[in-house]
Image (tube, grey):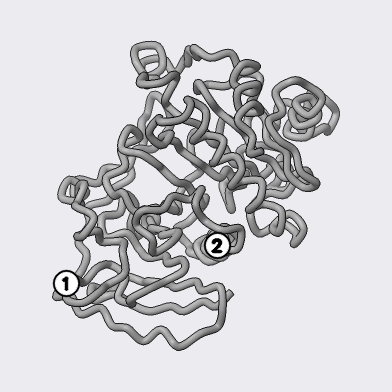
């Protein structure tokens, strides 16, 4: 992997990740951009104890531009984009309309390919491995920032999810706090460790799921399953078999196998609802151990956490979406219309031949 860092016209950082060591990346951003101005502010909810990012400047962000005006495609001819060069393998840059900025964290955009019409599932294993390497490198770099406590790599795919740019891309949020979802996980992890005399909750879950009927696919180093209490109609958790706290902890064998396993999962998601259906909208999210903020969870350290990816769709059946209505949005009590066992069976049925 070759890594090249540069600056955009407004001072934001942009990094090229290339599969091979080719010609130098010397293209300059020629757009007349002024400095980025943000209003990001973190406010604490005194009742729930969680944090909310207030970012009013995001109201003006780019919204469903036509393909020939996509800001994530390479610059070509007289059309200038967020990527100054005429081609790229993978590129990462600071978001122009960040939810988090400065002391409130950092937000980055990850473009998986320069091909506007592709999706992650269309990538070759070599391209998918490069994305994994970029996620890992950004996790390492962002974790060193003094304001960052947790790094979250994710992809939103599909207009139904709320995606406003059609180009295949994901994001990385570097939070200045431990996220509420992770806080809940850490509490459960600490409680289980104490009650079991030092056992690990992630190890227990993985052993039980591998012995059950909800395994979707399994390789030498990774296993994917629909969890016992899945929140979403079709939800898969992907774990490395060797527990590691974050992407940096993966060994070469796990890294080499990841593209094959992950690409197969994504392709199955697009076949869930049958031929002729539009691409399945999904969220794909990496859960990594925080780099700080563990002091409140007695007896827990970073190595107790298990890196894993959650992949889920909000489509519950052909032409119908799962909306977060009263119970889910008002009380955080999910109601799932698809039994996890049925979801796992369907995801095995649509395996690549």
* Residue 323 showing in the rendered view: no
Residue identified by numbered label 1: 33
Residue identified by numbered label 2: 127
Which of the two labelled residues, at mark 2 and mark 1, occupies the earlier sequence position? 1
Residue 43 vs residue 88, the one in the foreground? 88
Q: Quadrant of the C terminus?
A: top right
Q: Quadrant of the N terminus?
A: bottom right
Give percent across and percent down for residue 128. Answer: 56, 57
Q: Secondary structure at mark 1?
A: loop
Instruction: From this view, report whether residue 350 is shown above or below residue 175.
Output: above
Residue reaching furthest right? 197
Contact, CB < 8 Å: mark 2 with mark 1?
no
User: Mark 1 Cα within 10 Å, few/some/many (few <14, many 20+)?
Assistant: few
The alpha-carbon separation of the residues under discs 2 and 1 comes to 31 Å
Q: Quadrant of residue 88?
A: bottom left
Q: Secondary structure at mark 2?
A: helix
What residue is drawn where x is 83% and y is 33%?
Answer: 198
């Amino acid at each position: 992997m070759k890594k090249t860092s540069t600056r955009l016209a407004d001072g934001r950082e942009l990094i090229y990740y290339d599969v091979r060591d080719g010609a130098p990346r010397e293209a300059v951003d020629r757009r007349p951009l002024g400095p980025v101005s943000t209003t990001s502010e973190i406010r604490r909810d005194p009742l729930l104890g969680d944090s909310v990012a207030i970012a009013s400047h995001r109201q003006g962000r780019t919204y469903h531009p036509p393909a020939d005006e996509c800001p994530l495609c390479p610059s070509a001819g007289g059309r200038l984009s967020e990527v100054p060069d005429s081609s790229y393998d993978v590129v990462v840059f600071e978001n122009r309309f960040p939810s988090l900025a400065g002391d409130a964290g950092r937000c980055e955009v990850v473009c998986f390919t320069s091909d506007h019409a592709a999706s992650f599932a269309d990538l070759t294993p070599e391209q998918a491995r490069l994305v994994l390497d970029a996620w890992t490198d950004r996790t390492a770099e962002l974790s060193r920032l003094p304001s960052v406590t947790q790094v979250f790599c994710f992809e939103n795919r599909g207009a139904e999810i709320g995606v406003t740019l059609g180009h295949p891309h994901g994001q990385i949020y570097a939070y200045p706090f431990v996220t509420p979802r992770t806080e809940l996980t850490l509490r459960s992890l600490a409680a289980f460790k104490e009650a079991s005399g030092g056992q690990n909750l992630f190890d227990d879950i993985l052993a039980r799921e591998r012995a059950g009927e909800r395994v979707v696919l399994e390789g030498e180093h990774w296993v994917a399953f629909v969890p016992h209490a899945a929140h979403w109609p079709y939800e898969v958790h992907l774990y490395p078999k060797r527990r590691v706290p974050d992407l940096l902890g993966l060994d070469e064998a796990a890294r080499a196998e990841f593209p094959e396993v992950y690409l197969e999962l994504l392709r199955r998601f697009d076949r869930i609802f049958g031929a002729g259906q539009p691409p399945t909208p999904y969220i794909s999210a990496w859960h990594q151990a925080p780099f700080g903020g563990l002091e409140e969870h007695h007896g827990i350290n970073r190595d107790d956490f298990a890196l894993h990816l959650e992949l889920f769709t909000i489509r519950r059946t052909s032409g119908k979406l799962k909306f977060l209505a009263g119970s889910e949005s008002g009380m955080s009590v999910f109601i799932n219309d698809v039994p996890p066992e049925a979801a796992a069976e369907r995801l095995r049925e649509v395996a690549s031949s």
